Amino acid sequence: MHSQVITFTLKGMSEAEYLKLCDDLAPAVASQPGLLYKVFIADRATNTYGGIYAWRDKASMEAFAKTDLVKAVASRPNITNFAAKDFAVIEGPTRVCHGLVEAAVASRR
């Protein structure tokens, strides 16, 4: 299991326009091979948006990073300060805390 946090700021785009974009892109993101789930995040006070992703494995995350979908979003002029960071998941205590694995299984039912 692998996780990823992507953040960015909006420039010249209202939050309503951004939320519409999220709604439009969500089905394409959801269909990515190896994606267990994505949580869309927002910190309106700092104009920071993005997502927390849970991946079946690092290879799935790396393949997603090379997709036209990611390239298109990252290159939009309204998306600035784009940053992506990946993390290995410490699975034992994560399972105890009903973390990524439990949530991913539950969301697929």
Image: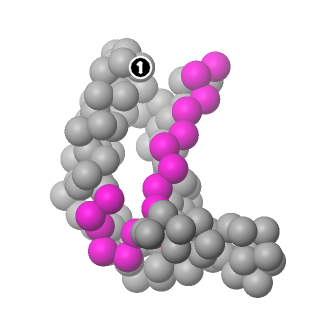
Q: What residue type is labelled 1?
A: Glu
- Rendered residue at 43%/69% (across/down): 108
- Rendered residue at 36%/33% (across/down): 79
- Rendered residue at 23%/39% (across/down): 24
Quarter placement of the N terminus:
bottom right
- Rendered residue at 74%/73% (across/down): 94
Corner quadrant of residue 86? bottom right
Residue range of the region highlighted in magenta in the rendering: 30-45
Task: From the top left corner, tell me how far across and down residue 102 is, in percent.
Answer: 62, 72
Task: From the top left corner, tell me how far across and down residue 20 is, in percent.
Answer: 29, 28
Q: Mark 1 points at which residue?
A: 15
So how many labels did they put on this image? 1
Q: Residue extending furthest front?
A: 109
Q: Is residue 72 visible?
A: yes
Q: Is residue 86 visible?
A: no
- Per the image, label 1 sits on a secondary structure element best described as helix
Task: From the top left corner, tell me how far across and down residue 100 is, in percent.
Answer: 61, 69
Quarter placement of the C terminus:
bottom left
